């Protein structure tokens, strides 16, 4: 919680040699999966209006494309994968879980019902994409694992391994009020100088004292936290 201490989990993968890209007009893909039958699985349905407002506030300063978009089509794995290229930031909101050291996402099928997707499947589908985001923000429980052993099966390290240089994910549960406090300063600071580790350090101070202040985790394959020049 100190601004003068920049903390992240470093993964030594091929993307570590990637040079910061020039800052252009930054675009974000905001994907929100809210299957109609979440209650059947004991999960709380998302408040879509609230989630969109939080995304607009948190991603202020970036051009936002939405999934589902104006066509109202569901947030399926296929649409998520095809929508990612060409965006600087992937902002994903959905339910997630680590089961037996494997990460799972709850996305939607064509009928807007729950589709359980292994984190490994999403990573494999994105691997090899030429225009991966520079940053992924996973607003979902246990996207960074729920303990040390589950970390290896969660989504965040998979995304770093395939070439996304910085991923913000959650260890354990993240409450909506904490997310509301954390995200706006994160992007406000990031847009100043492109330093994701510094932006996270500032944003952490906004959630000091909250019971889930430990939840946000930054993973990087960059030796410097500079995402763009």
Image (spheres, rainbow, N blue to C red):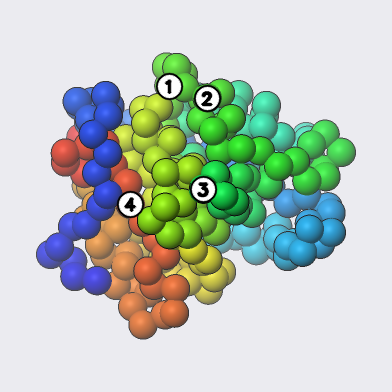
Q: Of all residues shown, which one is farthest toward the right?
A: 111
Between the C-alphas of marks 1 and 4, the distance is 21 Å
Q: Point out which mark residue 131 bears.
A: 1
What residue is drawn where x is 19% and y is 70%? 2
Q: Point out which mark residue 218 bears.
A: 4
Q: Earlier in the sequence, mark 3 or mark 2?
A: 3
Q: In front: mark 1 or mark 2?
A: 2
Quadrant that contains the C terminus: top left
Q: Earlier in the sequence, mark 3 or mark 1?
A: 3
Provide the secondary structure element on which disc 4 rests: strand
What percent of the width, then of the height, locates residue 41? 78, 58
What percent of the width, then of the height, locates residue 177? 53, 74
Q: Residue under label 2, please give it.
A: 124
Between the C-alphas of marks 1 and 2, the distance is 15 Å
Between the C-alphas of marks 2 and 4, the distance is 21 Å
Other residues around mark 3 within 10 Å, as few (<14) / some (14–19) / many (≥20): some
What residue is drawn where x is 62% and y is 32%? 80
């Amino acid at each position: 919680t100190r601004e003068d201490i920049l903390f992240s989990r470093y993964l030594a993968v091929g993307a570590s040699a990637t040079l910061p890209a020039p800052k252009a007009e930054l675009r974000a893909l905001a994907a929100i999966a809210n299957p109609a039958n979440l209650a059947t699985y004991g999960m709380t349905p998302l408040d879509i209006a609230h989630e969109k407002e939080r995304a607009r506030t948190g991603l202020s300063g970036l051009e936002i494309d939405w999934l589902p978009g104006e066509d109202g089509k569901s947030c399926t794995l296929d649409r998520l994968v095809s929508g990612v290229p060409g965006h600087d930031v992937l902002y994903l909101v959905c339910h997630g879980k680590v089961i037996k050291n494997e990460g799972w996402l709850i996305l939607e099928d064509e009928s807007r019902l729950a589709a359980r997707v292994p984190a490994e499947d999403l990573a494999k589908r994105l691997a090899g994409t030429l225009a991966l985001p520079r940053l992924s923000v996973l607003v979902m429980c246990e996207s960074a694992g729920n303990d040390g052993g589950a970390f290896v099966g969660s989504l965040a390290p998979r995304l770093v391994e395939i070439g996304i240089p910085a991923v913000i994910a959650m260890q354990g549960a993240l409450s909506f009020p904490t997310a509301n406090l954390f995200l706006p300063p994160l992007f406000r600071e990031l847009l100043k100088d492109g330093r994701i580790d510094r932006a996270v350090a500032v944003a952490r101070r906004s959630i000091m004292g909250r019971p889930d202040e430990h939840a946000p985790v930054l993973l990087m394959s960059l030796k410097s936290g500079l995402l763009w020049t």
